């Protein structure tokens, strides 16, 4: 017959069950913190330089190996891809318009347009050159209008391409099984 361990009954509350019986045996808080930081530093060194066997061995002392999970990405929801692609392409369009506005404002403040007008007048000369103004061709309002048109076309195209990509991935995953990914837990 095998002996069963005898369970001790205690009058301690549920909060005290996790504490050891004798707290004087525990290391002081500062020592426990420095030990944890030392282990974390060893793990960081091992991750930063995986070729160093000493760092890997030192980090693995007393630690269990990280868990790994093999997963397969078998389907991507086209609706969620479309929403995400639309949001990201709108953000890209706004960034594009703002950046073009900033560049054109800096060019105007730096006097680039006046310099171009002066250069054209010096090269061409005569009456025709005095009526020339580069702002008539590449003015801020004209460039911003063109940039907004390009941004709207980009939003439509990027959203459509991303959604089509999700549909194509789903068809390929149905045939081939999808992409296999191995996830590992940080220790």
Image (tube, grey):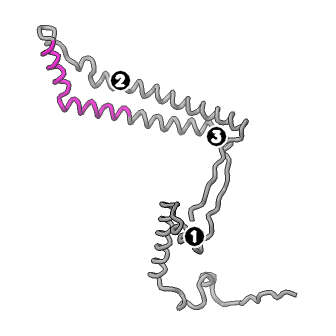
Q: Position of residue 64 (x, y in %)?
A: 62, 69
Per the image, the residue denoted by label 2 is 145
Per the image, the residue denoted by label 3 is 76
Q: Position of residue 93 (x, y in %)?
A: 42, 33
Q: Residues under labels 2 and 3: Cα distance?
A: 36 Å
Q: Looking at the image, is mark 2 or mark 1 nearer the viewer?
A: 1
Residue at the spot 27% in from the left edge and 17% down from the top edge: 137
Q: Does residue 158 appear left or right of residue 139 in this picture?
A: right
Looking at the magenta stretch, what is its main secondary structure? helix
Q: Residues under labels 1 and 3: Cα distance?
A: 37 Å
150 versus 32 height, above or below: above
Residue stretch rendered in magenta on the structure: 96-123
Q: Does residue 33 appear left or right of residue 17 in this picture?
A: left
Q: Nearer the viewer, residue 88 or 175?
A: 175
Question: Where residue 60 is drawn, which disc sits there?
Answer: 1
Q: Does residue 99 appear left or right of residue 46 in this picture?
A: left
Residue 108 colored magenta? yes
């Amino acid at each position: 017959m095998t002996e069963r361990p005898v369970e001790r009954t205690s009058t301690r509350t549920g909060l005290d069950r996790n504490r050891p019986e004798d707290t004087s045996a525990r290391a002081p808080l500062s020592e426990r913190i420095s030990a944890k930081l030392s282990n974390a530093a060893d793990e960081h060194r091992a991750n930063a330089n995986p070729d160093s066997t000493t760092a890997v061995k030192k980090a693995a002392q007393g630690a269990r190996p990280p868990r790994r999970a093999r997963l397969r990405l078998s389907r991507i929801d086209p609706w969620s891809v479309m929403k995400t692609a639309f949001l990201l392409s709108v953000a890209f369009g706004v960034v594009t318009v703002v950046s073009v506005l900033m560049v054109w404002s800096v060019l105007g403040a730096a006097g680039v347009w006046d310099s171009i007008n002066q250069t054209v007048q010096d090269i061409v000369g005569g009456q025709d050159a005095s009526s020339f103004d580069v702002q008539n061709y590449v003015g801020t309002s004209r460039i911003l209008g063109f940039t907004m048109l390009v941004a709207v076309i980009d939003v439509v195209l990027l959203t459509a391409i991303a959604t089509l990509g999700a549909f194509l991935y789903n068809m390929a995953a149905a045939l081939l099984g999808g992409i296999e990914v191995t996830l590992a837990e940080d220790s």
